[in-house]
Amino acid sequence: MKRVLLIVLLHLSLFFIVFAYHAQAEEDDMWTIDKYESLTFARVYGEVIHGDSLNFFIQSKDNCEKVWHNFTFYTYEQPGDIKQLLNKNIPIKINEEEVTAYVDHIQPFLMGYRVLLSLGSFPIKEYIYKLNNFYIEEQRFEIEIIDGIDFKASKYFDISINRWNLDKLVPSVLEAHKKCKEINKVDS
């Protein structure tokens, strides 16, 4: 009986160790930092729709000093005129502040569409520190696609809101920036 109890306790202990390690690994893996040819990026996935990404792209052709901030929204809606949104600004809210996002790309994905929207290109360090301070002050980073003049969000997006965890924004983007600088050293 003692032997069976010991085996059960060992298995439970092993389970909790593996579970704790896995939970820590998931937290550490929240951001993806990578490079592709002359481009590096830091990416974090959404909390509402995990497949929606918030991206920070850095190109070596800009001497790694600009960051292109964009995000994706997946939609199950399939209106026949979704492609008419391409190259247009659509209304959004970032934490209740109304702005617009530029529709950069629309592609069929799974049973709907993935829409890539851009917030623009900015000086890297100034922008990420400003965004980080905004996130700390607001305690969230949430984007909602909203109705506008001649634009009904629900026609194109079945889920029109997502949130992203920006806790590791600065070190993640700075790591992508460092990788971009490495590309420039190799190209020199």
Image (spheres, grey):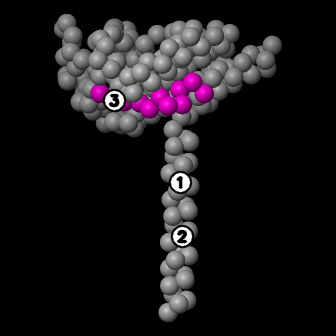
Q: CA distance from mark 3 to mark 1?
A: 25 Å
Which numbered dot is residue 30?
none
For disc 3, the marked residue is 162
Camera-near label (2 vs 3) is 2
For disc 2, the marked residue is 13
- Say whether residue 125 is magenta: no
Residue type, label 3: Asn
Span highlighted in magenta in the image: 161-171
Q: Please identify the residue farthest to the front as the structure is shown.
A: 137
Q: Secondary structure at mark 1?
A: helix
Please provide percent x and percent y for residue 20. 52, 56
Please provide percent x and percent y for residue 14. 56, 68
Graded by Cα atoms within 10 Å as few (under 14), some (14 to 19) or many (20 or more), the crowding at tag 2 reads few
Instruction: Give the vertical position of 94 relative to 89 (above or below).
Output: below
Can you see residue 98?
A: yes
For disc 1, the marked residue is 22
